[in-house]
Amino acid sequence: MDDYTKLKKSLRNMQILIIIVIGLVVFGFALDFLAVQKTVSVIEENAQTKPLKTSYVVQNLKGDAMETWYAWQPRDKIEIQIVGENNYPKEKIDAVKRAILSTETIEIDNKLVYKGDEGTSTYWIGWKGAVDYIREKRGIENSLDISFTDKDDADIIITLTNSKSGEGLSGVTNSMVNDEESTILRSFVTIYEADKLSNEHMEIIIRHEFGHVTGLAHSTAPEDLMYPVIQTPAPYISECDIDALLHLYTGGKTSQVICES
């Protein structure tokens, strides 16, 4: 084989190698592009707020549906049972407990919740923090003891189920009351399609339903946590939720949440 033939063969091999390298680079770019597109799709999906439809029912000891809400008798301890807890990941159960037990507060820009162009508003992440704040304002020194238990006779029963609500609800609260004494006796919360809920949505729904457990009805403001369809960009316990609960537990005759700018 002369030098020319060797050179020609070497160039041909080099061309094949270059084509292979270019092909691999193009293939790599294609994979990266698909990965980016998938990521963008996930971000866009998460950016869309999913409306969460809820409901509540109040019944007296005779089983009659009531139109008004009542308050719990003064107490220092509340026990909660989660039915179906072992069927879900720990992170999802932690979301349930965070919505109830957290004592943290956050400041949210008023522009996000249509309260004007300036300043921030305080929101509570969990109901324990909100209730303890109310107890402090009422001059009650000790905080409320909220514990989780396996007891079937717990004050509050939260049932997580994969079943679908026939009414398309994400959650519902049913409270039994003694209408003669105007007190709540027990509350039962059901969360539907719990297996399909993200941890974030689980926390939001529990936070809303536990508002009903405390005695609150629905809010008149779409941007509030206690609005019948949860669609707020700030799904936390608002100052007007606090005011409504304080009103209820100091002898108020209504439990509706009315938010004013």
Image: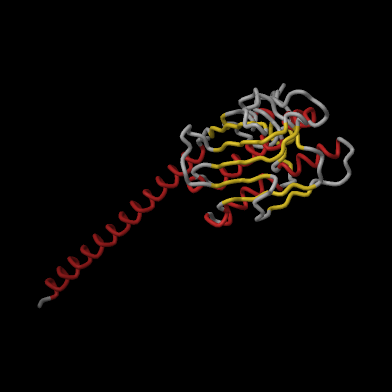
Q: Give residue 184's quadrant in the image.
A: top right
Rendering coords of residue 224 (x, y %): 65, 29
Rendering coords of residue 89 (x, y %): 54, 56
The answer to whether residue 99 is seen in the rendering is yes
In the rendered image, which quarter contains the C terminus? top right
| Residue at image point 15% right, 68% down | 8
Q: Give residue 21's quadrant in the image.
A: bottom left
The residue at the far left in this view is 1
| Residue at image point 25% right, 62% down | 20
**148 left or right of 251?**
left
In the rendered image, which quarter contains the N terminus? bottom left
**146 left or right of 172?**
right
The residue at the far bottom in this view is 1
Rendering coords of residue 246 (x, y %): 79, 31
| Residue at image point 69% right, 32% down | 109
Q: Give residue 181's quadrant in the image.
A: top right
| Residue at image point 57% right, 46% down | 159
> In the depicted view, which residue is nearer to us: 164 or 32?
164
Rendering coords of residue 70 (x, y %): 73, 30
**239 left or right of 52?**
right
The answer to whether residue 112 is seen in the rendering is no
